[in-house]
Amino acid sequence: MDGISKGRRDHGADDGQVLGSMTLYPLPESVCRARRWFRHFITKHEVACSVDDCVLMISELVTNAILYGRAEEEWLVRVEWRRDGKSLRVDVHNPGFPASVRLRYPAANEAHGRGLGLVDTLSDSWCAGPSRFGGTVVSFEMADAWPS
């Protein structure tokens, strides 16, 4: 598995009802802020999927955006979440994020490299591609977040 291990959807599509978004500075404290804001704003939507799993995946993707993002000028990380039918989709945009997002298999003694592995394990699908803001977006989807 590499790159887009479970990406079963066209990343160019911007379908679905936007439920919320946040813009963050690329600072370590933004990871905690992203977790807290998502948990607060998703609660009223009564999702059936694990909010804890979503918070963990957001934390990993925002951390990656902050650690690996680069740009010539000041840049921001944008997180959006939307309802797409019965699914919840979360997008993390970073204008400086490298275009070659890939799933790694780190050795047991490596300190980094497990974030996308967690996303791959916990989500129903994930993908990476060009962001409409420029740079890259990494997304995950939780199917059946709203059962019929």
Image: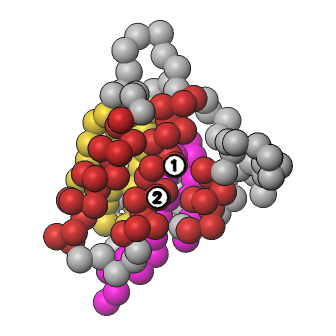
* Callout 2: SS: helix
Compared with 75, 4 (above or below) is below
Taking the spot 28% from the left edge, 36% from the top edge, the residue there is 23
Q: Residue furthest front?
A: 109
Left or right: where 27 falls relative to 68: left
Dot 1 amino acid type: Glu
Q: State which region is magenta.
A: 124-148
Compared with 133, 116 (above or below) is below
Q: Is residue 130 magenta?
A: yes
Q: Residues within 10 Å of mark 2 (few under 14, many from 20)?
A: some
Residue assigned mark 2: 56
Taking the spot 28% from the left edge, 61% from the top edge, the residue there is 39
Q: Quadrant of the rendered structure where residue 90 is?
A: bottom left
Residue assigned mark 1: 60
Query: Where residue 31 appears, x then y in whole percent?
Result: 39, 42
Dot 2 amino acid type: Leu
Query: Where residue 50 appears, x then y in whole percent?
Result: 41, 74
Q: Is residue 109 magenta?
A: no
* Cβ–Cβ under 8 Å for marks 1 and 2: yes
